């Protein structure tokens, strides 16, 4: 499992190729594929968000989700997982 996590967290593999296809990153982040290519030229932010979204989905074993990040990152993640027709309880802890 640790190797799988390490593999997922890596943006690029040993050969220097991206772990996720640009189309997959675009689909996960609901962005246009050209936006993914532009992100890869600068900071790989969309790849990072896609990877963490995949980890969250693969490791979700209960009703609890723990997220860490700054205000902007958490806002993006909260918006992507909350559904309009459900109720939630959110706890915030400064780390």
Image (spheres, helix red, strand yellow):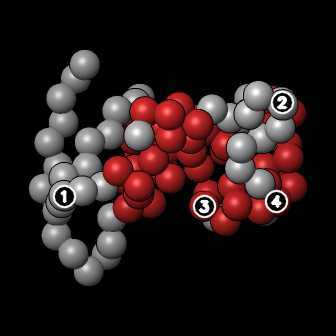
Disc 3, SS: helix
Q: State the quadrant of the C terminus.
A: top left
**Disc 4 designates what residue?**
33
The answer to which of marks 2 and 3 sits earlier in the sequence is 2
Compute the Cα span from label 4 to label 1.
32 Å
Read off the residue under disc 1.
62
Residues tagged 2 and 3 counted as in contact (Cβ below 8 A): no
Q: Residues within 10 Å of mark 4 (few under 14, many from 20)?
A: some
Which quarter shows the N terminus?
top left
Figure disc tally: 4
* Residue 76 visible here: no
**Residue in the image at 40% along x and 50% along y:** 56
Distance between the Cα atoms at labels 4 and 2?
A: 20 Å
Residue at the farthest bottom position: 85
Residue 57's spot in the image, x, y percent? Answer: 41, 57
Task: State which quadrant residue 94 falls in.
Answer: top left
Q: Which residue is found at the position 78% from the left and 41% from the top?
A: 18
**Disc 2 to disc 1, how far (Cα)?**
35 Å
């Amino acid at each position: 499992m640790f190797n799988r996590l390490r593999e997922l967290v890596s943006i690029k593999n040993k050969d220097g190729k991206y772990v996720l296809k640009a189309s997959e990153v675009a689909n996960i982040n609901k962005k246009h594929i050209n936006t993914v290519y532009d992100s890869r030229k600068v900071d790989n932010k969309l790849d990072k968000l896609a990877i963490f979204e995949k980890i969250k989905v693969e490791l979700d074993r209960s009703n609890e989700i723990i997220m860490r990040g700054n205000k902007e990152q958490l806002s993006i993640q909260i918006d992507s997982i909350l559904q309009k027709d459900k109720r939630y309880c959110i706890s915030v802890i400064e780390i």
